Amino acid sequence: MTTRRALLQLAGLMSLAACDERPAPAAASDRLIVETTDGLAVVDSTTGRATVPAGPSVVTGDWTRLVRTDWTGKGTRLATHELPGGEVVAGGTLRDRLEARVVSPDGRLVALASPKGPRSRTTVVVADSSGERVRVDLPGNLEPEAFDATGQFLFVLDYLPPTAPDRYRVRAIDLGARALQPLLTRTKSVVPAGAEEEMRGQGRQSVYDPVRGQLFTLYTHQPDHLHTRDLLAGARDSAPHVHAFVHTLHLTERWAYCIDLPEPFGARAAEGHAIALSESGNRLCVVDATTATLATIDPTALNVVSVRPLPAPLDTGAATALLTNDGGTLVAGAGTKVLVSPLSGSPTRWSTPTAVRGLALAGPRVYVGQDGAVTAHELTNGQLLGRTPVPNLVAVRHVIPHP
């Protein structure tokens, strides 16, 4: 399940333009969405200037809007920035201390919740440009995950037990009724009590599919896990233990379905796994950098269509992966190695000075997160095109290409 809520925070970037270390000239002035130890910000790849100030933020699935929250001491201030320019297009203040978690696909709604941590009750607030629309206080430790396509339901992770969680399940809040409900099965029937999946492993990364209105999340390390279909029909001999799977959440029809991944997926370190979806939605892949294995998934039929070795190995460490818009080329990184593997043509692999901290594609350029910087490279051969200092970088998350 991107973890599902991989969108975090970033502070102090407004001073980047005054840093002694200037970025090398890049091929174009792209906008980098970066995450640091303090939150999210948007940075000009040429000047290093932060066009959106740092702070606890979330972004829309299409990367067109960023919503920032700030605690004023009296309430939570919201500011919605339109990207790539960063203009504030909506704002307001909500009572109580809340943290933004997710934005609706159209950028119209934002869901906020109580600060993270063990708790027996959770306050969830849904706001729009006019202010607070819905406020619910529900029993349990709930974390907003995604809006449904209509904005009438909010999917949440329900952590169990609430004050000392070791597992969680996906449920939905009916915002009209202000009530928590189970999901539906793929046949659109309500999942009965006792048949809701409880995840104990790690939600490694999520990717949003706007073509089908689905959220794909990669899970690893699921010993003795049973899917809802197994709880209803009995465990299958072919999958007695699930070490990794892709959880599919349909944001229109409100059902969930899991795509099992074969070994060796999930047998090694969770951080060595990554998921990637092409912008066109025609190709979905999972990479296991530790074993140099690639799985290709049919995002419509929801099954694994092929498993094969990567054309060249990557290093151990945190993996990241992307597909070009048409799905024709896979770009993956782990450790200090970046692999560019087209469906047709010869693959290339090149090294980076420090461990890869995220990847972002802008046509013929690939941006690579490094220690304290984001570097721009020629996609086909890794030639360095530019370097943008970003203090305390956690990862580069996305790039909005220069028009």
Image (cartoon, rainbow, N blue to C red):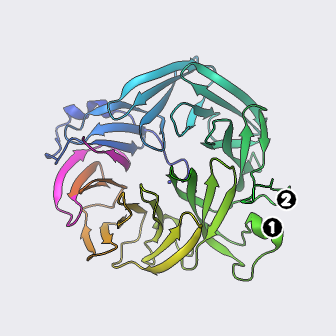
Residue 198 location in percent, x, y?
73, 59
Between residues 344 and 267, which one lies in front from this camera angle? 344
Kindly give the residue lying farthest to the left in the view shown.
25
Indicate which disc, 2 or 1, sits on the residue closer to the N terminus: 2
- The residue lying at 28 percent from left, 75 percent from top is 347
Q: Which mark is residue 231?
A: 1
The answer to whether residue 306 shows anywhere in this view is yes
Between residues 392 and 31, which one lies in front from this camera angle? 31
Kindly give the residue lying farthest to the top in the view shown.
74
Q: Is residue 36 above or below residue 365?
A: above
Magenta segment boundaries in residue numbering:
378-403
In the image, taking residue 22 as reference, residue 51 lies left or right, namely right
- The residue lying at 68 percent from left, 57 percent from top is 256
Q: Quadrant of the C terminus?
A: top left
Label 2, on which residue? 194
Amino acid carrying mark 2 in the image: Gly
Amino acid carrying mark 1 in the image: Leu
Residue 80 location in percent, x, y?
46, 27
Residue 246 location in percent, x, y?
59, 64
Q: Is residue 379 above or below residue 65?
A: below
- The residue lying at 24 percent from left, 61 percent from top is 379
